[in-house]
Image (cartoon, rainbow, N blue to C red):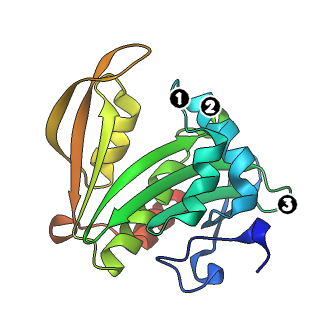
């Protein structure tokens, strides 16, 4: 595998095992797959569109050198455009969701839900018992997404975010209480 297609294979034994396809309402064929190093610039642009405090390009590229990261993308099967991204970092039997981002024009189509479920399914299959995340208290769309995928409130981090300053809600997913699977979510998105 050349460097441009390097993945962090902590979860997947091979890249092919992670690929699924969705057709967006505009007819675009989207491939759901593990992020490769060659995706970093496009993912960086998506994160900048979505967040005030987006990861730097260097941070994205660095994660390919650190064990425990798993990042999924929804990419245009033809041109490689990244429509959505979800990332997770695991240590022992816990993990943190780093970011979930979807292009503005593609929000509400289920891409974020499906990518997040892919991460959670991989986590559960690899011995991860709990997954945590922080979300802006005012981000109603993200809160709805996280609740829909099985995350429950677990606390509050005062003044966690900057630009603008805001509390973060801490949310937790547990393998023991999870009742969804990525395949069930994928089937709902396809309908």
Q: Secondary structure at mark 1?
A: loop
Q: Establish if 153 lies above or below 136.
A: below
Judge left or right: residue 33 versus residue 76: left
Q: Residue at x 25, y 71 (%)?
A: 93
Mark 2 or 3: in front is 2
Judge left or right: residue 97 versus residue 5: left
- The percent coordinates of residue 134 (x first, y second) are 30, 39
- The percent coordinates of residue 146 (x first, y second) are 33, 46
Q: Which mark is residue 48?
A: 2
The answer, for residue 28, to whether it is visible in the render is yes
Q: Secondary structure at mark 3?
A: loop
Disc 2 to disc 3: CB gap under 8 Å: no
Give neighbour class at mark 3: few <14, some 14-19, many 20+ (Cα, 10 Å). few
Mark 1 or 3: in front is 1
Please give the residue where the numbered disc 1 appears in the rendered image. 51
Q: Establish if 159 lies above or below 108.
A: above
């Amino acid at each position: 595998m050349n460097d441009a297609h390097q993945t962090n294979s902590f979860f997947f034994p091979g890249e092919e095992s992670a690929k699924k396809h969705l057709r967006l309402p505009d007819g675009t064929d989207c491939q759901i797959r593990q992020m490769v190093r060659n995706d970093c610039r496009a993912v960086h642009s998506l994160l900048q569109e979505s967040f005030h405090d987006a990861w730097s390009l260097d941070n994205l590229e660095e994660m390919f050198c650190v064990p425990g990261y798993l990042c999924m993308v929804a990419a245009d099967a033809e041109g490689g455009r990244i429509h959505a991204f979800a990332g997770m970092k695991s240590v022992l039997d816990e993990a943190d969701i780093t970011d979930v981002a979807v292009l503005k024009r593609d929000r509400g189509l289920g891409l974020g839900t499906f990518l997040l479920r892919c991460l959670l399914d991989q986590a559960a299959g690899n011995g991860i018992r709990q997954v945590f995340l922080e979300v802006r208290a005012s981000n109603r769309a993200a809160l709805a997404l996280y609740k829909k995928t099985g995350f429950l409130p677990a606390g509050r981090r005062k003044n966690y975010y900057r630009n603008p300053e805001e509390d973060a809600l801490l949310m937790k997913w547990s393998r023991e209480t999870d009742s969804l699977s990525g395949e069930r979510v994928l089937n709902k998105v396809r309908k």
